[in-house]
Image (spheres, grey):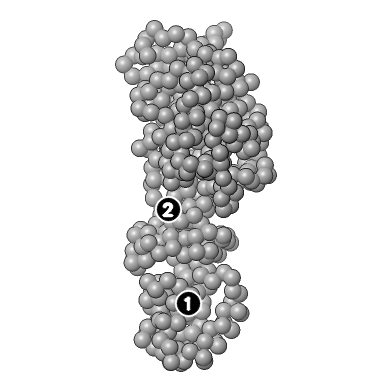
């Protein structure tokens, strides 16, 4: 790459899934394409997804896909129509890769290796003649002046790339070690695009209570999380205790909703229903019977039927109950406290890990500045956006990768 670079029809900035799909699509339609990546290789974040297995997409319906992106998720309808989840799977299957569907509709390659996905993308780009340049960080973009249609992309060492159209697919601001440092947001602002507040999505939460550190490594399966003000209920997943707080699919998938509440408060009270399969009445009946039939049993031993061993001392301390007591020694107040804690175990959320530890970025280039039917800017003709740089994120499960591939495909059509 030098100062006298050739003219390109399309310059794609960012070699993540969105950028690679945009480059493949544009080059498939006969355009001369250059793909520019600040890292030394493509798809660094892609390789990490699904714990290295690459949760490519989800089998969800169009309605469910859009719903996963929350308020105004319908913005992505055109993108998901142009490259649906079945289209995306077919793209890779037609190139020799097979897939399997796991819990929750999550789609993985049968290889259980994200490198299988990256290899096909890389091969497709090379076959189409896409020029790929690594270790190049975009500094600024000079947009075309009146009557001209040429973008000038300025890089370090006085290097300039010229192109008729530009696709920004620089990612968000999460997992900075993969190159997602928010450069695209700066470029967007410099070119008069609005950028909504940046927040972490799919990120672990910090818990105030000091005893949480002692629960590190414990996984609670199929618990229910309840927030009372405002009323929110999250269920259908597992929760993991960490040395700083809570993580696991149930927390990660709903972290952005909880974090949004922290904007107005410095802490959020949430409660764990440790036995969601039982109503309060059913649990009371079960426990009352146990206090009679297991009278000689230590209460700490009986509770092993309900919670992991290491949680029992914490639960009994909160219930102000001596763990050495027998079941028939527990008074009514203690019994009610234990039952209430099993249905509403309290935790105080007082923060979250920083955005560079988040899996995705929530917020980004405002959708108000992007044409939903093409991903082209409403402000600058010939500039397109694709992937995580666009405002809006979804829970884990393959939805965010589908968004990246679909918006990349739509942007690459250059319609």
Q: Position of residue 15 (x, y in %)?
A: 45, 28
| Residue on which disc 2 sits | 204
Above or below for 260 versus 238: above
3D distance between C-alphas at marks 1 and 2: 28 Å
Q: Is residue 339 above or below residue 159?
A: below
Percent across and percent down for residue 397 are 54, 47
Displayed quadrant of residue 299 = bottom left
Query: In the image, residue 304 lies at what x, y percent?
Result: 44, 77
- Position of 120 relative to 402 (above/below): above
The residue under the point 41% across, 25% down is: 37
Name the mark nearer the viewer: 1 or 2. 1
Residue 83 seen in this snapshot: yes
Q: Residues within 10 Å of mark 2 (few under 14, many from 20)?
A: many
Q: Is the residue 324 above or below the residue 139 in the image?
A: below
Q: Quadrant of the N terminus?
A: top left
Q: Which residue is mark 1?
A: 305
Mark 1 Cα shell of 10 Å, populated few (<14), some (14-19), many (≥20): few
- Given residues 51 and 142, the one toward you in this image is 51
Q: Residue furthest front?
A: 96
Which quadrant does the C terminus fall into? top right
Q: Earlier in the sequence, mark 1 or mark 2?
A: 2
Residue in view at x 48 percent, y 89 percent: 294
Kind of element beneath mark 2: loop
């Amino acid at each position: 790459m030098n100062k006298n670079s050739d003219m390109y029809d399309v310059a794609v900035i960012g070699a993540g899934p969105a950028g690679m799909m945009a480059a493949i699509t544009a080059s498939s339609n006969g355009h001369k394409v250059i793909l520019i990546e600040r890292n030394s290789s493509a798809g660094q974040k892609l390789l990490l997804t699904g714990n290295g297995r690459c949760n490519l997409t989800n089998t969800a319906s169009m309605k469910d896909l859009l719903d996963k992106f929350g308020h105004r998720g319908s913005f992505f309808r055109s993108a998901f129509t142009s490259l649906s989840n079945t289209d995306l799977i077919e793209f890779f299957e037609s190139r020799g890769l097979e897939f399997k569907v796991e819990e929750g509709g999550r789609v993985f390659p049968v290889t259980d290796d994200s490198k299988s996905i990256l290899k096909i993308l890389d091969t497709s780009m090379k076959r189409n003649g896409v020029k790929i340049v690594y270790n190049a960080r975009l500094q600024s973009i000079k947009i075309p002046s009146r009557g001209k249609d040429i973008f000038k992309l300025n890089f370090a060492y006085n290097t300039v790339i010229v192109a008729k159209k530009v696709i920004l697919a620089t990612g968000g601001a999460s997992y900075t070690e993969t190159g997602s440092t928010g450069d695209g947001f700066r470029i967007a602002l410099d070119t008069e695009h609005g950028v909504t507040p940046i927040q972490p999505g799919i990120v672990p939460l910090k818990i105030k209570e000091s005893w949480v550190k002692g629960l590190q490594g414990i996984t609670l399966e199929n618990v229910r999380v309840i927030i009372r003000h405002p009323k929110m209920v999250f269920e259908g997943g597992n929760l993991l205790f960490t040395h700083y707080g809570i993580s696991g699919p149930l927390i990660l998938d709903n972290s952005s909703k909880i974090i949004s509440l922290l904007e107005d408060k410095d802490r959020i009270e949430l409660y764990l229903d440790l036995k969601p399969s039982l109503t309060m009445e059913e649990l009371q009946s079960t426990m009352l019977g146990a206090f009679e039939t297991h009278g000689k049993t230590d209460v700490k031993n009986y509770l092993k039927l309900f919670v992991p061993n290491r949680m029992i001392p914490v639960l009994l301390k909160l219930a102000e109950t001596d763990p050495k007591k027998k079941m028939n020694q527990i008074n009514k107040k203690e019994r009610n406290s234990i039952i209430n804690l099993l249905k509403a175990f309290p935790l105080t959320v007082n923060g979250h890990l920083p955005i560079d530890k988040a899996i995705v970025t929530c917020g980004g280039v405002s959708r108000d500045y992007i044409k939903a039917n093409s991903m082209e800017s409403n402000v600058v003709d010939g500039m397109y956006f694709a992937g995580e740089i666009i405002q809006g994120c979804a829970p884990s499960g393959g939805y965010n990768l589908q968004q990246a591939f679909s918006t990349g495909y739509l942007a690459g059509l250059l319609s």
